Image (cartoon, rainbow, N blue to C red):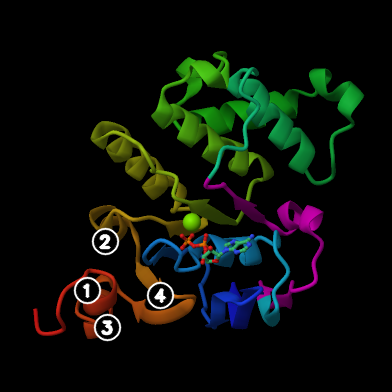
Amino acid sequence: MQTEGLTKRFGGVTAVDNVSISIVEKQFRAIIGPNGAGKSTLFNLLARHTEPTSGSIAFDGRDISNLPLHRLPSIGIGRTFQKSNLFWHLALRENIRLAVQALAVPPYRFFRSRAVPELDTAVDKILERLGMSAVADQPVATLSHGDQRLAEVAVALGGSPRLLLLDEPLAGMSPQETQRAVEIFKELAKHTTIILIEHDMDVVLHLAERITVLEMGRVIADGTGAEVQSNARVREAYLGLAPSC
Ligand code: ADP
Ligand code: MG
């Protein structure tokens, strides 16, 4: 995925300011930056949930700047939201099933869906990949917080994305839940390009091959963990350290 001069203004606020980034296939990219830096807005642009004020987005060499939102799964992009996007009273299995059904290309015929074995196989595979088979039949509302966050990822996997956008999927997780999720993301990353918004620097440094740092909508650094950590601007702006520290 590549962006060129991507910009989003809300009235007088420039949430994303002239961002040009390039993510190669199978790369694990993290996006970090203080609250209000424009991370979620950048995701909303990449996932076509928000129209850019200016600039362009390309995926797989193709300009998707004007692609309708509903076409996104069909070209291989999946995402999670910072706020929950699940049917809480339905079992986890049913949530994933609905996602697979809705996002499959070509689409399953809704009225025949109960009799489609590939659908069940696809759902079981996702449950296995996330280590959630044991809780598959529980309503999402009764799952632990960590499992609820992973359920968001499970639903995003319903469209078999080649690129997965994860917006703070670890928020509110216990250290044990975080550790488990990190292992799961590592496994997913073997087959999928992942862009992760995350605050925990240990997690980011552990997972990401490349890190993009946003501040006030602008990219202030982009590089490996070591490069970003030694960047004077980042240390000053994000880590709150004097440049000489
Ligand atoms: P982050 O995810 O890095 O915390 P956001 O992308 O949510 O940052 O927000 C970036 C800036 O854009 C903030 O100043 C925020 O208030 C503003 N913003 C985000 N979404 C909207 C919106 N829908 N309308 C107006 N301002 C918005
Ligand atoms: Mg955000």
In the image, 184 versus 196, the foreground residue is 196
Which of the marked residues, 4 or 3, is nearer the chain's N terminus?
A: 4
Q: Residue furthest front?
A: 12
Q: Which mark is residue 229?
A: 1
Secondary structure at badge 4 equals strand
Q: Residues within 10 Å of mark 3 (few under 14, many from 20)?
A: some
Quadrant location of the C terminus in the rendered image: bottom left
In this view, the mark in front (2 or 3): 3
Measure the alpha-carbon separation of dots 4 and 1.
Answer: 15 Å
Left or right of 68, for residue 11: left
**Amino acid residing under circle 3:** Arg
Q: Residues within 10 Å of mark 4 (few under 14, many from 20)?
A: many
Please report the residue visible at 60 percent of the width from the left and 56 percent of the height from the top. 162
- Residue 176 in percent (x, y) is at 26, 32
Instruction: Report if the CB atoms under discs 1 and 2 are less than 8 Å apart.
Output: yes
Q: Tell me which segment is drawn in magenta.
A: 58-82
- Residue 100 in percent (x, y) is at 71, 36
**Amino acid residing under circle 1:** Gln
**Amino acid residing under circle 4:** Glu
In this view, the mark in front (1 or 2): 1
Left or right of 214, for residue 139: right
The image quadrant of residue 51 is: bottom right
Relative height, residue 42 to residue 147 (above, below):
below
User: Which residue, given by chain and number where applicable, does mark 2 sit on?
Assistant: 205
Examine the structure image and report whether residue 174 is included in the region drawn in magenta: no
Please report the residue visible at 72 percent of the width from the left and 52 percent of the height from the top. 73
Please report the residue visible at 49 percent of the width from the left and 64 percent of the height from the top. 39
User: Which residue, given by chain and number where applicable, does mark 4 sit on?
Assistant: 215
Secondary structure at badge 1 equals helix
Which of the marked residues, 1 or 2, is nearer the chain's N terminus?
A: 2
